[in-house]
Amino acid sequence: MIYLDYQSTTPLAPEARDAMLRWLDGPEGTGFGNPHSSHRMGRQAKAAIELARDRVAALLPAGGRVIFTGNACEAINLAIRGSGSGGSVSVSAIEHAAVLDTAKALNAAHILNVSKEGQCNTAQDVPADTRLIAVMQINNEIGTVQPTIDWHRKAKEVNALFLIDAVQAYGKMEVTHADMIAVSAHKLHGPKGIGALWVRDGVELDPQITGGLQESERSGTLSPALVAGFGAAAHLAKELREQDAEHVEALWTRARELFSDWTLNGAEDARWHGNLNIRRNGLDVNRLMSECRGVMFSAGSACASGSGRPSHVLKAIGLSDKQAKNSIRLGFGRYTQMEDLEKAAQEINAAAEAQGL
Ligand code: PLP
C-alpha cells in the first residue's frame, strides 16, 4: 500500500510511539497512574504531561497557555463557544467543518469570501458586531496558506478575538499573531485522540466540558500516553522542520512533473507543497479510486461526511460541481518515498487514461 493522504492523518513517528509505551505499561507496570493523583505514580505521569506541554508550546507563540483536548474539533469548539456569546463569528468560506458548523450552530456565522487562488484576504468587511474571526493557516483540502497576520490586525481593528485553526500548519511553519490556536497531534506524526488549544494570556474561556476541570478550562482525565506521544511528535517536528520541508519540496517538484496533464486546484506558491489537489475534466473519481486500491488518497469532491456532495472548499474557489467532482487530493510528507510517489502516479495516470482522458 502506498499512503498519500497526509492531510487526513499521518503515520505515527517511531519516537512518538516509544514515548507513549512508558505510560501504557512502564517499568513493572507503573505507567498507568492517573496524572491528577497526588501519589508518586500520579506525580510521575503529571511530570510527563508537563514535559509534553512544554514541547507542544515550543512550536507556539510565547505568552499563552496550552490546554490539552481530545482532538482539534474539541479545541475549536472550546475556542468558539467558550470565548463569548452573542455577536457574529466571521469565518472563511474554506474552514474545516469544525469551525464552519460550530459558527453556524450558534447562528453567528458570517462567511468570508475566498479568491480563485484559495486565499481569504482582508479586503472585505466583517459585521460590526463580530466578536471572533477564525481563519485557518493552511487549508486541509487545497493546502493554500492564508494571510493570518493580516487577519489578526483586522480582528484587533474591530475589537474581536482571532482564532487560527493551525491543524495543518502546526510543526510545518510558524504560527503567530492569534488569541487562540487549535492543533492536533495526528497531523504531525503523533497519536490520534489528542489535540490542544493555545490561548493567549488574558483571554478567558468558559469550560465546555465540566467535571473535574483537570485542565483548568476542560474536564477529563488526561491520557499520559497520548499526551507524551504528542509532545514527542512536536519535539521531533521542531528538530526536523527544515529537513521535512526540503523533502516535501523535492516530492512536490517531482509530483508536478508526474501529474503535468492535470490542473492544479488553488495557488501554486502560497501553498503547503505537501498537498497536491488536482483535477482532470470528465474524471470519474470513484472509478479511479476503485481501480487504484493500493494507493491511499482522497477524492477532492466528497466532504468529510462522505456524503458525495461537492467540496465546499472547491466550490468556494469557483469550481463548478463537475470540476469539484473531477478532483483528487494527494498528500505526502516525511515518510513518503520518492519511488512510491512515482509508482502511485503511474497507477493513477494509467487509470485516468483508461477512462479515455
Ligand atoms: N481542522 C483541520 C484543518 C483539519 O484538517 C482537521 C482534521 O481533519 C481538523 C480541524 C479536526 O482535527 P481532529 O481530527 O483532531 O478533530
Image (tube, rainbow, N blue to C red):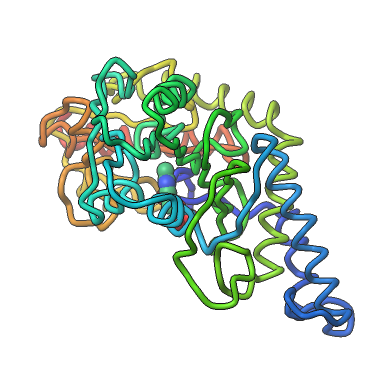
Q: Is residue 316 above or below residue 166?
A: above
Is residue 260 positioned above or below 111 on the image?
A: above
The residue at 30%/33% (across/down) is 92
Residue closest to the eye, 20 or 12: 20
In this rendered view, identify the residue nearer to me: 217 or 43. 217
* 81 relative to 215, above or below: above
Query: With 162 as the anchor, is 42 left or right in this view?
Result: right
Say whether residue 277 is left or right of residue 33: left
User: Considering depth in this image, is 271 or 53 the residue closer to the camera?
Assistant: 53
Snapshot quadrant of residue 90: top left
Residue 299 shows in this picture? yes
Q: Where is residue 117 in the image (x, y as percent from the top left)?
A: 30, 19
Give the camera-side residue of 310 and 80: 80
Residue 125, picture quadrant? top left
Residue appearing at x 64%, y 51% in the figure:
66
Q: Which residue is drawn at 35% across and 19% down?
A: 267
Q: Quadrant of the C terminus?
A: top left
Q: Is residue 40 above or below residue 264?
A: below
Residue 73 lies, in percent from the top left, at 42, 56
Q: Is residue 317 left or right of residue 13?
A: left
Residue 347 in view, yes or no: no
Across the whole image, how many numbered discs are drawn on residues? 0
Q: In which quarter of the image is residue 285?
A: top left
> Where does the image place residue 353, in percent across and percent down from the top left?
23, 32
